[in-house]
Amino acid sequence: MQNRPFTYLFYLQYLGLRYHGWQKQPGVKTIQGTLEKAFRFVLGHEDFTILGASRTDADVSCNRGAFELFLKHEISSDLLSTLNSFLPSDIRLLGFESVPLTFNIIQDVIWKEYRYHFAIGEKFHPFAAGNLTFFKEKPDLDLMKKGAKLFVGIHDFRRYCSIDKVTDDYSREILESDICTHSDAGKGFIPEKAFTFSVKGKGFLRYQVRIMMAALMDLGLGKITLEDLKNALDSDHTSPISVAVPANGLVLERVEFKKIRADKFQPLFLP
């Protein structure tokens, strides 16, 4: 019998509106807590551990996130369909595979991509509210695009996050940062004037993407300048440059790992 734990990497997606974030908390519904409940029921025991690649906040959704499962026995491919049948409709497992014990779901991340979806002008249909935030004002989008480019590189993001007493390291590297038209603009319930702020990096601070988006909106509305945006990336002040935008427009789009490429990942089952 194998003494070391068996480890599996799962990919999943979820709509975050009904949940108080990823991390399990007493008395509230969370993504991790809901997953653990399903695993306990299907496995028939609770001798396992789930560790997520990202701790999304309340109302934040996910298109292709990941978590690692540790347990003392092997699992079969049909487990995925069974788990999906017991999970609520707003959480779906995409696939899983065995990974070596040397795999670290935190340290082996190459990059994460977040997307903030928003619409401007007229208020959109309520059916689109799950992953879209509405702004009544009409900002200068070209100026916002210029501002987004300033985030690329290694910067001190202490003015673009919620200050955490646990760390004093606010340096993060942004690989890509851009604003473009929403991929589904004008389709279904998504209005024509819908846009997406996309940002990619290895790791992010708490509320970082939402405050970056808020600063870009303030820039587009003339409340701050490009110089203000740039100076805040090299500052020892701790007050946020802007007030974080609502969480419901934010989506963890994708997580990419060393050795295991998400675009080559072959799910054992797709519902």
Image: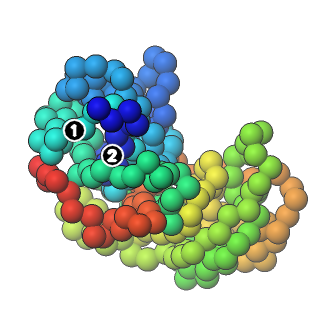
User: At which x and y percent is residue 34?
Assistant: 33, 29
Q: In which image quadrant can residue 64 be found? A: bottom left
User: At which x and y percent is residue 116?
Assistant: 46, 61
Q: How many marks?
A: 2
Say whether residue 148 is left or right of residue 96. Answer: right
Rendered view: 269 above or below 84 = below
User: At which x and y percent is residue 22?
Assistant: 45, 38
Q: Residue, x 48% and y 52% (percent of image)?
A: 102
In this view, the residue in front, 13 or 135, is: 13
Regarding mark 1 in the picture, which secondary structure is present there? Answer: loop
Q: Is the N terminus in the top left, top right, bottom left or bottom right quadrant?
A: top left
Residue placed under numbered mark 1 in the picture = 75
The CA span between labels 1 and 2 is 9 Å
Q: Residue, x 33% and y 31% (percent of image)?
A: 72
Among the two numbered marks 1 and 2 on one chain, the one whose residue lies closer to the N terminus: 2
Q: In which image quadrant can residue 120 be found? A: bottom left
- Report the coloring of the rendering: rainbow
In this view, the residue in front, 194 or 112, is: 112
Q: Residue, x 27% and y 41% (percent of image)?
A: 91
The amino acid pointed to by label 1 is Ile
Regarding mark 2 in the picture, which secondary structure is present there? Answer: strand
What number is the disc on residue 8? 2
Number of other residues with Cα within 10 Å of mark 1, as a class: few under 14, some 14 to 19, many 20 or more: some
Q: Are circles 1 and 2 on residues that touch, CB within 8 Å?
A: yes
User: At which x and y percent is residue 49?
Assistant: 41, 32
Q: Residue, x 39% and y 52% (percent of image)?
A: 100
